[in-house]
Image (tube, rainbow, N blue to C red):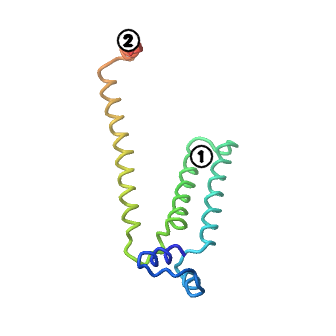
């Protein structure tokens, strides 16, 4: 229904909801309330599963990390399909291009930050011994 309303408002032809427009919104590929309910339910269940795994300490270490990353990826797919409607577009994939741009910016920020922190740590540790680092930190406490 949201795509139909959006298209009608842009063209200036929105006359209100009638049977034809409601039937048009239920055609294949259109978004329905059921789609949102399924997406919301799946998101809540995936979040609860992650919370239960962590709070009850059912897994630990790398196993927990792998399961949480897997649940996060499934949650990402649910969000993309049910709320961003990436698989249901009829027009050019502008949302997909925008999403790809956002993912690239996030990757650059995360990996760039990790790279900078690694290089700073490497440079800092090569120049000073641990006792010199402690002395330097203690001398900067007054700032």
Residue in front for this viewpoint, 130 or 15: 15
Q: Are marks 1 and 2 in contact (CB under 8 Å)?
A: no
Question: Residue 86: percent from the left, percent from the top?
Answer: 46, 69
Rendered image: mark on residue 17: none
* Rendered location of residue 22, percent (x, y): 58, 82
Residue at point 63%, 50% (across, down): 50
Q: Residue at x 52, y 73 (%)?
A: 2
Outermost residue, right direction? 56
Quarter of the figure with the N terminus:
bottom right
Between residue 3 and residue 11, name the one nearer to us: 11
Q: Which of disc 2 and disc 1 is earlier in sequence?
A: 1
Q: Nearer the viewer, residue 140 or 133?
A: 140
Extreme residue toward the bottom, this view: 20
Looking at the image, residue 56 sits to the left or right of residue 62; the answer is right
Query: What whole-number distance in Å separates the C-alpha atoms at marks 1 and 2?
Result: 41 Å
Residue hosting label 1: 64
Residue 38, how many percent across, how many down? 63, 67
Q: Which mark is residue 139?
A: 2
Position above or below: 39 against 52: below
Secondary structure, mark 2, is helix
Q: Residue at x 38, y 56 (%)?
A: 102
């Amino acid at each position: 229904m949201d795509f139909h309303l959006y298209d009608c408002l842009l063209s200036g032809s929105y006359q209100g909801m009638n049977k034809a427009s409601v039937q048009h919104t239920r055609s294949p590929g259109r978004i329905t309330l059921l789609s949102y309910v399924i997406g919301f339910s799946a998101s809540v269940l995936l979040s609860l599963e992650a919370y239960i795994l962590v709070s009850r300490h059912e897994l630990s270490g790398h196993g927990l990390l792998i399961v949480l990353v897997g649940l996060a990826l499934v949650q990402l797919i649910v969000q993309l399909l049910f709320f961003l409607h990436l698989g249901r577009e009829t027009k050019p994939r502008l949302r997909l291009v925008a999403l790809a741009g956002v993912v690239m910016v996030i990757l650059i920020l995360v990996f760039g930050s990790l790279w900078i922190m690694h290089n700073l740590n490497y440079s800092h540790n090569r120049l000073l011994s641990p006792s010199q680092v402690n002395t330097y930190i203690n001398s900067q406490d007054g700032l």
